[in-house]
Image (cartoon, helix red, strand yellow):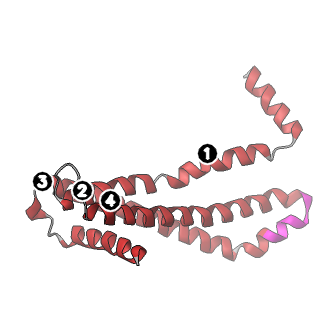
Amino acid sequence: MVHLFALNVLTTTVVGIFDGNILSDGLLMLVLAIILGVMNLLLAWQMLVRLALLFVLIVLAPLGLLCFGLPQTQGYGRLWTSTFAVTLFVQFFQVVTLALGGMLIASTQTTSFLNLDTGVVSLLVSTAVMYLVLPIPGMIRNWALRPIAQAALSPGQLVGRLISTVVG
């Protein structure tokens, strides 16, 4: 029940932004609504592109799995596997972050934060949630997948990379 209420509040806030009933609440609300609207469009674009990539990877699944058959094409198989896994995991983490943010927005509806209007607080928290959700793919790529990919290198490749780092 809490999850449905939290997502309902997030949905009502986004619908309120696009309906245009925010104009009567002041300049701060208008600026926050525009910023949140742009962030929502960016997130929607990001998720649509990721969904298209996922469909392409599903279609290429037989070829990706066949690449593991030959030693010369195993690199392509590993590339397909890692791209497929990252695409699925990033979507999961973004949706979980949005759900938790919706719960946070729902909890700010019942409390007064710095004696601000609940609409202003809701827009501020929604903007903060979107600000955290948008860079999740880059964060996962930089902080989770790069160390895994570097650990998967062979010892000879690691020595060569170390020598080129020290010399270069």
Q: Secondary structure at mark 2?
A: helix
Q: Position of residue 51 (x, y in %)?
A: 54, 71
What residue appears at the point 71 percent right and 73 percent down from the top-left corner?
A: 60
- Mark 4 is surrounded, within 10 Å at the Cα level, by few (under 14), some (14 to 19) or many (20 or more) other residues, namely many
What residue appears at the point 73 percent right and 48 percent down from the top-left corner?
A: 148
**Residue of label 3:** 27
Q: Amino acid at mark 3?
A: Leu
| Mark-to-mark CA distance, 3 and 4 | 17 Å
**Residue of label 4:** 126
Q: Amino acid at mark 2?
A: Val
| Mark-to-mark CA distance, 3 and 2 | 14 Å
Q: Secondary structure at mark 3?
A: helix
Q: Are marks 2 and 4 in contact (CB under 8 Å)?
A: no
- In the rendered view of the protein, which quadrant contains the N terminus? bottom left
| Mark-to-mark CA distance, 3 and 1 | 38 Å
* Label whose residue precedes the other's in the sequence (4 or 1): 4
* Label whose residue precedes the other's in the sequence (3 or 2): 3
| Mark-to-mark CA distance, 2 and 4 | 8 Å
Examine the structure image and report whether residue 146 is included in the region drawn in magenta. Answer: no
Q: Quadrant of residue 58?
A: bottom right
**Residue of label 2:** 121
What residue appears at the point 54 percent right and 50 percent down from the top-left corner?
A: 138
What residue appears at the point 70 percent right and 44 percent down from the top-left corner?
A: 147
Give the residues drawn in magenta, as a range.
Answer: 65-71
| Mark-to-mark CA distance, 2 and 1 | 31 Å
* Label whose residue precedes the other's in the sequence (3 or 4): 3
